[in-house]
Amino acid sequence: MEIIVIGGIAAGMSAAAKAARTNKDATVTVIEKENYVSFGACGLPYYLGNQFEDEQEMFARTPEQMRASGINLLLAHEVTAVDFESKKLTITNLTTNETLVKTYDRLMLATGATPIVPPIPGIESSNVYTITKPERVMTLKADLADYQNIVVIGGGFIGIEVADQLAIQGKKVTVIEADNVIMGGPFDPEFSNKIMEAVSEEGVIIKTQERAQEFVTADGKVTLVKTDKGEYPADVVIVAVGFRPNTGFLSGQLEMLANGAIVIDEYGETSIPDVYAAGDCATIHHRLAGTMYIPLATVANKMGRIVGTNIASNSEERMAYIGALGSSAIKAGAYEAASTGLTEKQARGLGLDIKTTCIETNNHSNYYTVQEKITIKLVYDANSYVLYGAQLFGKNETVLRLTGLATAVHAGLTTKELGFIDYAYAPPFASTWEAINVAANTAK
């Protein structure tokens, strides 16, 4: 069996490794246009922020390690066309510019996503960066000492993480966000506002409901960012406004969402037999909301493992994915925030009859040192009390509580059950009534 995986980062390498272990007789080939594999881009903001110095920490496996495990690698090669009927790939060697053709029995599409670069005049300047590839971020880090005024376009995960890390280093950072809140996807407004306050405490200036209109340049570099409401001096501009699936070369041959994300089923298979997809180029099944586009590393790795099993197995041995919850977390200054399942906004958008509770409670017993407040919001069914989602904000010991809440949402527990779950107690870690218990028992 000839298995070809297009893309060798998170989902692709996870699938390839699992496929090679699952079917020892299969030939597994990964085609990757970069010269590396298994790269964790989530570490880039923290590498830029000097939380660690060795960029190799962001690579889970080297090409040599993958080849030693029996996987064929074609690095610096790009698939430019797919003929699904004849099962042929047209591939360009990016080093020699030669074209070659390969056939497959089963194919996985793991082409990832590209950062959206809006058509703002001046955006092609040399000091405009996206935080997605190691080489560009290494360049930015090497020159960072020469920069003071940094403008970040976009208030999502990457924008806020980068802004936070640069502010810690004493940079003057301004975030421009078109929405009326930052982090408006995974969080309801009250939590978005808390995150904004936390980052602002580090010195980050956040401008919401404002759009960049022009990057004023001199000698090929941006010197000033003009928005519809103001002007901001800039030594560097970082663009982090979202991602677009890398599926343009497929020319709409498969079922896709409007943004180009490939629609897959619970087995990772696309609308074309023997063709699978996963990661930032594909959809995912959300346990409560159905088919969604959720470009998160956790989902990519899990779905990659599922595809690796299924692409190398007989149909009766295939595994179905249990579904995602969009669980996510972020560090914001001295604080932490996390979300799982549905926000209030998402639940109401789905037409669900819900109630919410939002409380502030303590992280552990008052007589143990450094007691802190944790804010917890629960979204639950108004009649059955089944938990649909949760959000948290606080300092120490906050985000790890999301593990229990995500499990509760996944299992369909009610707030009434959650209020009496027997969580571990010791004064350094919790109160006799764990914070999750306290929140759940306020659900009426």
Image: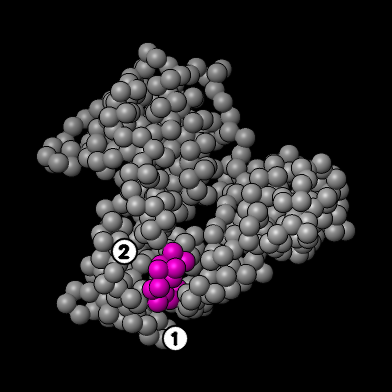
Q: Which residue occupies 41% across, 86% down? A: 230
Q: Amino acid at mark 2?
A: Tyr
Q: Secondary structure at mark 1?
A: loop
- Please tell me the numbered disc located at residue 375: none
Q: Which residue occupies 24% across, 36% down? A: 75
Q: Position of residue 2 (x, y in %)?
A: 33, 21
Q: Nearer the viewer, residue 165 or 317?
A: 165
Name the outermost residue toward the top.
Answer: 25
Please say whether residue 166 is one of the residues in the magenta stretch: yes
Q: CA distance from mark 1 to mark 2?
A: 23 Å
Q: Which residue occupies 18% across, 42% down? A: 94
Q: Nearer the viewer, residue 21 or 431?
A: 431
Q: Position of residue 86 (x, y in %)?
A: 31, 27
Q: Which residue is mark 2?
A: 129
Provide the residue span drawn in magenta: 163-176
Q: Which residue is mark 1?
A: 229
Q: Secondary structure at mark 2?
A: strand
